[in-house]
Amino acid sequence: MDNTENKKIRKGSSDKRAKIIAAARDLFLSDGFDRSSVDAVAAKAGVSKRTVYDYYGDKQNLLLAVVEVSSSAVLDMIEQGISDHLWEFEDLEQALILFCKQIVASANGSSDYIALIRLVMVEAANLPDSFFERLDNATEEGIIRRFTEFGQNGLLDVLDPKMAAKHFAALTFLLVFNQPRKTGTLEEEQTKRIITEGVRVFLCAYAPRTVQNENQPSY
């Protein structure tokens, strides 16, 4: 009896948290953080105001929880892309291109990514600096691990895997995300061109330098 009751309580708490997060995200996106009250969040989630405070303490922590849930979903997309394309492959250039294309496609179809970007852009002043630092580190972590191993296996010449990951992201999927656009997403061909050229520039900078150019004189 006790175990069954405990499971129901834990499930109920999880459901309430999910409803509170969903309600808060909707209100923060539609009305803005400053204009959204805890009363409104509680009413939309179907819980008491006290429950919101018990779970999250205050509205600032609730906003942080909302962006952390959205960022977790985005990080899962990156890890899935790594798993799908950067573990087993025959051609590194093609693997990196496919990885970036999957990240862009997943992000364009993700309500979590759209919510994260909008909230981070609009409500940056209401988020702690530590959140942005954690997000940057987490976003790069999986790519850094693979680039470190690529360096060890002779696929890349990587002295600083963290810097290499920043360069790679900036030249590829982040460049796609930062492009001005008139309608929601870029044309597929434009996205493909940006990613392909970015991957090639990256590989030019980080290609192994163990083989000397035959036309280059030796000293």
Image (cartoon, helix red, strand yellow):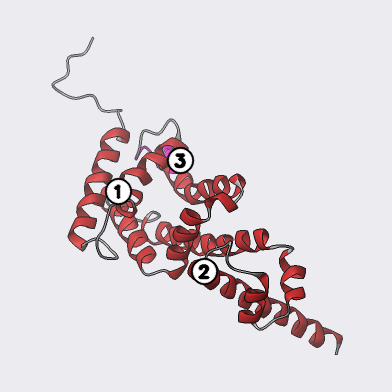
Residues rendered magenta in the picture = 149-155
Location of mark 1 (residue) = 92
Give the amino acid type for the residue marked by disc 3 in the picture.
Thr
Whole-number angstrom distance, CA of label 2 to CA of label 3: 44 Å
Q: Quadrant of residue 1?
A: bottom right
Q: Is residue 152 magenta?
A: yes
User: From the viewer's perspective, is 28 left or right of 113?
Assistant: right
Which of the pair 182/139 is nearer the observer?
182
Q: Residue at x 38, y 63 (%)?
A: 107
Q: Whole-percent x and y of residue 2?
A: 86, 85
Tell me, for residue 31, which label it has, or none. 2
Which of the pair 102/173 is nearer the observer?
173
Q: Residues within 10 Å of mark 2 (few under 14, many from 20)?
A: few
Helix, strand or loop at label 2? It is helix
Q: Whole-percent x and y of residue 45?
A: 63, 80
Location of mark 3 (residue) = 148
